[in-house]
Amino acid sequence: MAPFSRGFRGHRPDAAAAGRLPPGQYETRDFPVLSAGPTPHTPLANWSFTMQGADGKTARWSWEEFTALPHQTTTNDIHCVTKWSKFGTTWEGISIDTLLAEAAAKGIKPSPYVMARSDGGYTTNVPLADLTNGKAWIAFMYDGKPLPAEHGGPARLLVPHLYFWKSAKWVRELRLMENDAPGFWESLGYHNYGDPWREQRYAGDE
Amino acid sequence: MSFVSGESPESGGRERVGDARRVDGNAAGGMFSEIFVPDLTTARAKCAGCGAEGMIGSLPVYAHGMGTVVRCPKCDRVVLRVARTPQHVWLDATGATCIVISRGT
Amino acid sequence: MSADAAAPRITWRLATVIDVVPETPRTRTLVLDVPAWPGHRAGQHVDVRLTAEDGYQAERSYSIASPPEDARLSLTVEELTDGEVSQYLSEVLRSGDTLELRGPIGGYFVWDIPVGGPLLLVGGGSGIVPLMAMVRHRNAALATDMDARHRLPARLLYSSRRWDEVIYRDELARLVEKDPTLEVMHTLTRELPEGWTGFTRRIDRAMLEMVAWPPSEQPRVFICGPTPLVESVATTLVELGHNPALVKTERFGPTGGSV
């Protein structure tokens, strides 16, 4: 055990926060920015969102088409694997259920697994069952304002019940897969699923 | 090439200068010393994407809380990435065609 | 000088704080006694690690301010508004305390006499720290050798927001007074004192053209500070014809607003 630094305090959750925090987390009032690469700035005129079926069929929306889809406001607690949690974050976005229904109308069939792909090359994998039934959105507004680029704007995946690395910033595509495959962090030692309430941070965590 | 900036045609409008948060290979030197005995900041890495070469100390590094991501300053591809979990260090060097480390002789 | 490939693995050591020296309103220098310190080169840094009683740890890197000639290790720390480590080092740590650190780290961003010159140093805010180690090393190593100094002239271009935020201000003035082969040019970007005659803007191409030696002189260049400044200066110098292999960079990331 490393020697203590006199007078250095770790993060201590207050009593009010304690019940709301998954194990090993602390509450922050900030919104830390973590980035694995340069911030993309794709002009909206060039932006599109794609759903791709396991058979390769695609459905694509331009920014105008995308934001014309029915959207919802959602307020959630979010939990980062680096141990900060932020309560009561408010987003506006399009439910993945809506997108799947729109994609089904274009002949795209569901598959059990999904790979989210982002501008800049980031990827993360999520079971389809964790994106449906009101559990996930493609969010384009945060706290009542257009989602800033540093937080993943113009649009990011939002899956609040899993560690926040699954909420891929700058998302451009959801690719349905018959078989699971690990994304960027899942292939570098992080847990394949990432449930904060079971503290599934790293590969091998139960 | 030790430092090249500016937009490449493939970058799709990505703005480099705006990323004040990024550091460079120097900042990852201490972490690298846990994996490599020789100093990695003076090693040269060749990008498997575009072939650009540079000393790791000069390469842009995103010290994401989950891991360290070293990118090519020319094409932005990931050259090297490292994550430290409680029990292991995960190193992915597939983004580098090769890494050349001086033996100091 | 250590042969990098043969250097022993860097281990965590427990240093003792001998002295704490205020520099500017937001910076101070920690003077440390480090047992069995293997020595270092100007430009290198250490990683500092703090451990709370509940086991929580935080690590940050700090450039070494002292030259290799000093018996003690100095780190100059800037207090960042939300920085948990910098807050601790700026407000809590005091003489007699211990501090865990490892180093020296980094063989890329280093300068010593054998590397040669002319020496061009460009710094912004706390980026001055490793550059100051280089200035101090040059001063100590070439102490009375005026010929050597003329063969290895040095220029420092240093960007700060305000005059009272210029770190090592008085020491730089003293060094310049004693040594005509050392030039220091300041630029202030936010507020100017009365009678200011230095530069008054962010470092740009015109300023670099004025300050830098021509590429034909092959100056060894070291640029350190906030990432946007470092990248912009490095790009500009290469555009002006400087050999990229002679332009070394150390990006500090975002800062607490020092430039």
Image (tube, rainbow, N blue to C red):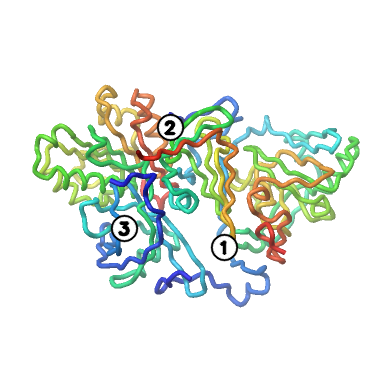
Q: Where residue B100 appears, x then y in whole percent? A: 47, 36
Label 3 sits on residue: C27
Q: Nearer the viewer, mark 3 or mark 2?
A: 2
Name the secondary structure under disc 2. loop
Q: Is residue C102 visible?
A: yes
Q: Is C177 on the left-hand or right-hand side of B34?
A: left
Alpha carbon separation for disc pair 3 and 2 = 30 Å
Q: Nearer the viewer, mark 2 or mark 1?
A: 2
Give the vertical position of C108 relative to C10 (above or below): above
Subunit that carries the residue with mark 1: A
Residue at screen point 61% across, 77% down: A15
Q: Nearer the viewer, mark 3 or mark 1?
A: 3
Alpha carbon separation for disc pair 2 and 1 = 37 Å
Q: Are marks 3 and 2 in contact (CB under 8 Å)?
A: no
Q: Amino acid at mark 1?
A: Arg
Q: Is A16 on the left-hand or right-hand side of C83?
A: right
In the rendered image, residues at marks 3 and 1 fall on the same chain: no
Label 2 sits on residue: B3
Q: Amino acid at mark 3?
A: Thr
